[in-house]
Image (cartoon, rainbow, N blue to C red):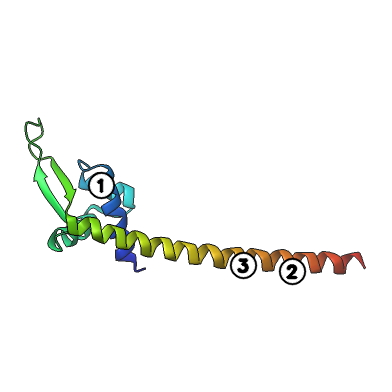
Amino acid sequence: MKLSEKAHFRILRLIEERPEISQRELAGELGVSLGKTHYLLKALLDKGLVKMGNFRRHDNKLAYMYKLTPTGIAAKLNLTREFLDHKEAEYLALRSEIAQLRQELQVSAEGDRR
């Protein structure tokens, strides 16, 4: 999974959880600059995965609300599958490495006892 796909996945998840989230808050959650967040969000808007609208009857008329489109929901599901597959592969590789290290320690400890 590419870095931009991971960022898009995280943005889609955050927007689904908190449609009123600001770009500044998104940037903080992602750990990237506001400019980078704007760039990533614009890409999602251009692809039609996210819609943006003004809050109505809100004191801050500059506030926006983001909403996943049906295409965005499908893309989020696909990205979730890819992310999960990637994380499961990482987990299995790490588990194998841990087992190998434990075996090395055991062999080493047995050698020290002799």
At numbered mark 1, what does the secondary structure look like: helix, strand or loop? helix
Give the Cα separation between the discs numbered 1 and 2.
Answer: 46 Å
Badge 2 amino acid: Glu
Residue 42 in the image: above or below residue 107: above
Which mark is in front, 3 or 2?
3
Q: Amino acid at mark 3?
A: Ser
Task: Identify the disc placed on residue 61.
Answer: none
Q: Residues within 10 Å of mark 1 (few under 14, many from 20)?
A: some
**Label 3 sits on residue:** 96
Residue at horizontal 48 percent and vertical 63 percent from the top: 88
Q: Are marks 1 and 3 in contact (CB under 8 Å)?
A: no
Q: Which residue is labeled 2 in the image?
A: 104
Tag 1: amino acid: Glu
Q: Which mark is residue 16?
A: 1
Q: CA distance from mark 1 to mark 3?
A: 35 Å
Query: For numbered disc 2, what is the local secondary structure?
Result: helix
* Side (left or right) of 82 relative to 92: left
